[in-house]
Structures are given as structure tokens and as C-alpha cells.
Amino acid sequence: MNGEELREALRHEMEVVASPPPLDTAAALGAARRARARRRTGWACAGSATVVLAVAGVAAVGTAGAGTPGAGTAGAGGASPTASGTKPIPGPSGKASAEPWPTGPDGRPQEDRTARAGTRYDQGVRLLNELIAVVPAGYVVPENPANQSVDDDPPRSSQAQFEEKVNGVDVWRYTSAATVAKGDRTGRVLVEVHTRGNKLPTEPCALTRQFWGMQGQCQVVSVGNAKVGVVVRPTTDRRFEQWSAYRHRDGAVTFVAQSQFFGSPKRGLEELPFTVPQLAALAMDERFHLQ
């Protein structure tokens, strides 16, 4: 085949094959726009799904936190006022009792350990009055303010609390405390009585160290023929600087404590109200011997 025949054959083939349709620019632009719209829709849906998942996650965390103590709410250990609306005297907490509380003056069991009326309550008030009566000359005992907050320790306080029943005998604990002031300086004195039947130890220093679980340097002081334990210097717990303890013949126990400070240590008393012999004698004083 020469060159002329080759050209003729190629021309024939081109005439037989159908020509491609002309380019439609409008159709091409429409297809492109539809593809772009589909892509945008996909992105929007994906973004919405992410937001929904995030909101669901936050809601789940919030729901879990609402049932967890400490997640913006007071836990079971939050402070709360007592039923009487007054702050109890700090001290050892009583043990749980399966027996009914003692009967109050209304003939019904008390609501809790603390007597708020009746003979036991009156005994606690009497103990406070006797404590104020022995405060040395030169000191004053401030009155309780009318607007006393339940979160603050009042200058004067008393409490009668049922402890337990031992061999059919009700054991009570009476605690009375008073702030003592000299000028602009203040300290604290306190008397606590455990009635007969209590399980406290007998040896003078072992008994004295039972006071609120506090420890310290103890010495035995003779008051007549009696032996009284006196902690003259505490170890780490310094709620009180000195305290004495005495077991009466009927088994009742009296603690007498004093502190040079009440409130700010910078405004504490220059000296303790009682000497060690006086503190020992007060533990034996019949005015602090309650039944």
C-alpha cells in the first residue's frame, strides 16, 4: 500500500466512526454544582452528629455528677445544727444504742441523747452555775449574746447527755463550760461529770487520760487522804492546758479542765485561772458530784 492508499483508508475510517457530541457547558456546570451541594450536605450532617454526641456526653457527665457526693452538693459529712439549734459542747461522741432513749418529762422517749428539759437538763444547768461560782476573783464570765450563731461556741454552755445503760443503770454525762475573761483576754474552764455505773478506769492517771482521749504529762496530787490525777502539760492535743480527774466513792467521775486560750491565742490569759492543787481539789468538790 502506497501513501495515497493509506491516507484514503484513514479518511474512510474517520467517516464511519460517529463524532462525539458537542460540549454542553450548561450541563457540565449543573453537574458540578450538584456534586458540590452533596459534599456540603455531607459535611453539615457530620458536624451535627458531632454536636449531638458532645451534648449527650455532657448530659451523661452531669447526670453522673448529680448522684455523686461532693459534685456541687453537700456530702453526708456536711455540718448540720443539732435539733435544739445550739452547738453541742465538743467532746467524745456517745456510742450507738439499740435501746430506747430515756423518758423525758413529757413521758415519751427523748429524740436523741441530749436532755432538753426535765431533771437531767436541770442538773446540767446547775453544774454550769456551780462552775461559774468557783471562778477566781478578778475574772468575769461573759453572758451569751442574744444573736449567738450556732457555729460559734457560746461563752456559757451546758449539756446533759445519756451515755449508756450498764447493768440496768442509766449512765449520764454532764458537761458545762464557761469563758473566763480578764480585761480583753479570755480563757476557758470546764467541768464534766460521768454518773455512777460508768466504765472509766480507777487508777488516777489512767482515769485522767480518758478525758476526751487527750494525753499529757500526769502527776498524782494528794488532797487530804485522796489521790487525784492531774495532767499538767498536754502532748499534741492542746484543747486544754491542764485537767484533773477524780472517782468518787459511789463511782461517779468528775473532770475539771482549764485553758489559757479561748478564741485567738494572741488574746489568751496571761496565766491559768487555777493552780494545780486548786484544780485537783475542784475535782473532789461535792458541788461537782452529780447523780
Image (spheres, rainbow, N blue to C red):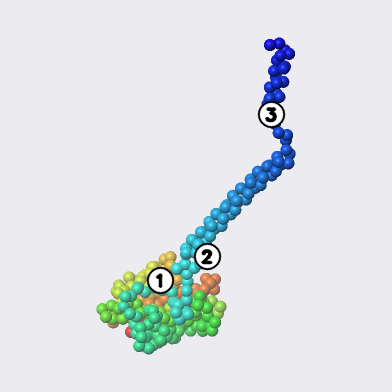
Q: Position of residue 11 (x, y in %)?
A: 72, 20
Q: Secondary structure at mark 1?
A: strand
In the picture, which quadrant includes the C terminus?
A: bottom left
Q: Quadrant of residue 97?
A: bottom left
- The amino acid type found where label 3 is placed reads Ala
Residue appearing at x 28%, y 77% in the figure: 166
Q: Nearer the viewer's eye, disc 3 or disc 2?
A: 3
Instruction: In the displayed orientation, state which residue is furthest to the top.
Output: 2
Residue 171 point in image, percent of width and height: 32, 79
Residue at 53% from the left image edge and 60% from the top image edge: 59
On the image, the x and y values in percent for residue 53 come to 55, 54
Q: Is 217 or 1 nearer to us in this picture?
A: 1
Q: Residue under circle 2?
A: 72
Left or right: 139 with respect to 202? Answer: right
Q: Would you place residue 42 above or below residue 254 in this image? A: above
Question: How many numbered marks appear?
Answer: 3
Q: Quadrant of residue 99?
A: bottom left
Amino acid type, callout 2 = Gly
The residue singled out by tag 1 in the image is 232
Residue located beneath label 3 in the image: 18
Nearest to the observer: residue 90 or residue 105? 105
- Residue in the picture at 42% in, 68% down: 234
Residue type at numbered disc 1: Val
Label 1, residues with CA under 10 Å away: few <14, some 14-19, many ≥20 = some
Give whichever of discs 2 and 1 has the lower sequence position.
2
Q: Is residue 50 left or right of residue 279?
A: right
- Element type at mark 3: loop
Gap between marks 3 and 2 measured at Cα? 80 Å
Disc marking residue 75: none
Locate residue 284, reporting x and y percent: 35, 81
Give the foreground label among 3 and 1: 3
